[in-house]
Amino acid sequence: MQFTSHGAAQVVTGSCHRVETEEFSFLIDCGMFQGGKELARRNYDDFGFDPKKLDFMILTHGHIDHCGLLPKLVKQGFSGKIYATSATVDLIPIMLRDAAYIQEKDTEHENKRRSRQGIPSRAPLYTRDDAEKVLPLLSPLEYRTPLSIGDSLKFILQDAGHVLGSAIVELLITEKDKLYKIVFSGDLGQNNVPIIEDPALIEKADYIFIESTYGDRLHDTRLPRDKQLMNVIKKTINRGGKVFIPSFALERTQELLYALSELQTKNSDFPEVPIYLDSPLAIKITEVFKKHPELYDADAKFRKDQPFSFPNLKCTLETEESRDISKSNEPSIVIAGSGMCTAGRIRHHLRHGIDKPQNTLLFVGYQAPGSLGRILLDGAKEIKMMGRTFDVKAEIQRIGSFSAHADQKGLTQWLQVFSPKPIKVFLVHGEEDTIANFSKHLKEQGFSTGISKQSESIIIN
Ligand SMILES: [Zn+2]
């Protein structure tokens, strides 16, 4: 059998791994490259395989860097089933319709520029119609329930503890009367985060493909993250500012809402200001969370949907409302997408507020190289956005421990549960330097490692 990464090989986004056995050919994930323009351009490249020849695919979770190229795949002839957990199946229509809308709008914008320069226009990567064609192929599965595909292949989805519905994939492949077990970690979450369960522990595997996003870093745990959040909010509101939180709509936003609700309940000195959830996408996704309380951990089960609806939370669906918030100087907390400031309403809030020293821009998630978020996090004194240059005077803060990804310690501990040690651990989904450092670290822990490289096949027999 052979495994080929067509994305998320020495880069964090664009997850797309092709598995070929004697009987089947299938994908695990078909994600979009995200971050700067350079990465985004790769979405237009050839897949490097024929989508018509795939038998089916398995989707680990609903993040766009794992599912965002599904409409392109179907447009190019893929017609097999797409297996995912039922929560992921509920999230995909919301995620893909939003992604397609962004594609259409970006292309409109790009074509105006091209027309000014006399360059031929281009078609969007895919449209909302293309996104709709993916939906009938989605096939929901439950965690821990094996599914056999023919005689030689079986797979099981386990909770990855990363976002609602996220899965680790256990593949059981029989070739020449020999059974192989290969585990794809998908994106792995941290232990003890609010709402969802911890990543499932798996005890046996011959080979593992593990994500490495934070493979060479430890999350800052000196102060509990809720305390860090409280400090940033109090400091900013006390000086009359606004706290802008660019947030990924899936999971991070719901965790933030959960944390803000907890802080307000437990601290009488929490500032009495409006909290705006200014993201139609995140608002819709929060409704999917409310539909799946069976996936909550014990604490969240106890609180039911209360963390997602508290008195000073204002969910703003309309553009008008969003515009009013961005123009107002009233102290407030604004959660808006996109998570890396590459699109969405957060850019309008930054347009009005990034040059004001009383405000804070608080990052709570991964920022890909080249993204506006990364540029700001790296300390830029001015930024170019929406055709203008803005001075950066707002305070820039980051709370790393909000990450939905396990850090080096978390990833290593998850691997150490496998007994005996796997024959080899292949590293995917990490920046090049991070992967090299993580590989070195794992070797010191006695693991044999390999690095999955773009379009290079790994043969296992
Ligand atoms: Zn993810």
Image (cartoon, rainbow, N blue to C red):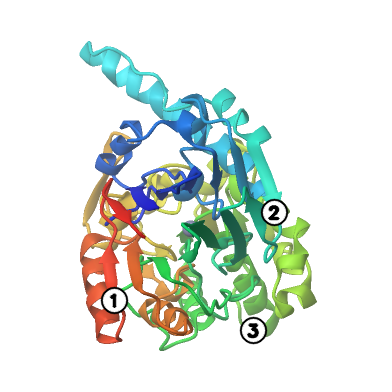
Residue 23 percent coordinates (x, y): 50, 44
Q: Name the residue under label 1.
A: 448
**Which of the 4 image quarters holds residue 432?**
bottom left
Q: From where the camera sits, is residue 327 visible?
A: no
The residue type indicated by label 2 comes to Leu
The residue type indicated by label 3 comes to Asn
Residue appearing at x 36%, y 57% in the figure: 356
**333, 438: nearer the viewer:** 438
User: In the current view of this chain or complex, which residue is farthest to the front?
Assistant: 177
Give the alpha-carbon distance from disc 3 to disc 1, as whole Å.
48 Å
Q: Mark 3 points at which residue?
A: 267
Do the residues bearing badges 2 and 1 touch, measured as CB atoms within 8 Å? no
Residue 439, placed above or below residue 413: above
Give the alpha-carbon distance from disc 3 to disc 2, as whole Å.
41 Å
| Relative side of 356 to 401, left or right | left
Q: Of label 2 and label 1, which has the lower sequence position?
A: 2
Mark 2 residue element: strand
The residue type indicated by label 1 comes to Ser
| Residue 141: mark in rendering | 2
